[in-house]
Image: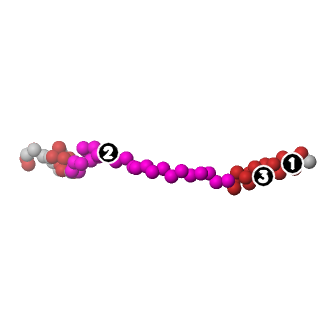
Amino acid sequence: MLKTKYCAALLLMALAGCGSRAVVVPVAGTCPVPPAPPAWVMQAPSNSLQQLDDLFSISAPGSLLIKQP
């Protein structure tokens, strides 16, 4: 008998909680202006392949001697 009353009370509270609507107050907010992008983003992309070619370039045509067996 006590379980039935307890379940009925819980059911009534659950239905009352689901049925009531919360008051929604509209907030008139403005979005903040995003900061400027960092300087490295504004630079032109680097050509890594060209940098590697410059780094590992042959200094003189005759400096590379490949001996074939």
Indicate the position of residue 59 as horizontal and vertical percent values. 10, 44
Point out the stretch of residues depicted in magenta. 20-46
Q: Earlier in the sequence, mark 2 or mark 1?
A: 1
Indicate the position of residue 43 as horizontal and vertical percent values. 22, 48
Name the residue tied to disc 1: 5
Q: Secondary structure at mark 1?
A: helix
* Circle 1 residues within 10 Å: few <14, some 14–19, many ≥20: few
Indicate the position of residue 16 as horizontal and vertical percent values. 73, 52
Image point 28% across, 43% down: which residue? 38
Image point 78% across, 49% down: which residue? 10
Q: Secondary structure at mark 2?
A: loop
Q: Which mark is residue 16?
A: none
Name the residue tied to disc 2: 35
Q: Earlier in the sequence, mark 3 or mark 2?
A: 3
- Asked if the residue at tag 2 contacts the one at tag 3, i.e. Cβ–Cβ closer than 8 Å, the answer is no
* C-alpha separation, residue under disc 3 versus residue under disc 2: 52 Å
* Residue 21 in sight: yes
Farthest residue in the bottom direction?
19
* Circle 3 residues within 10 Å: few <14, some 14–19, many ≥20: few
Q: Is residue 39 magenta?
A: yes
Main SS, magenta region, reads: loop
* C-alpha separation, residue under disc 1 versus residue under disc 3: 11 Å
Q: Is residue 58 magenta?
A: no
Give the number of the mark in front: 3 or 2: 3
Residue type marked 2: Pro
- Pick the residue in front: 10 or 63: 10
* C-alpha separation, residue under disc 2 versus residue under disc 1: 60 Å
Q: Which mark is residue 12?
A: 3
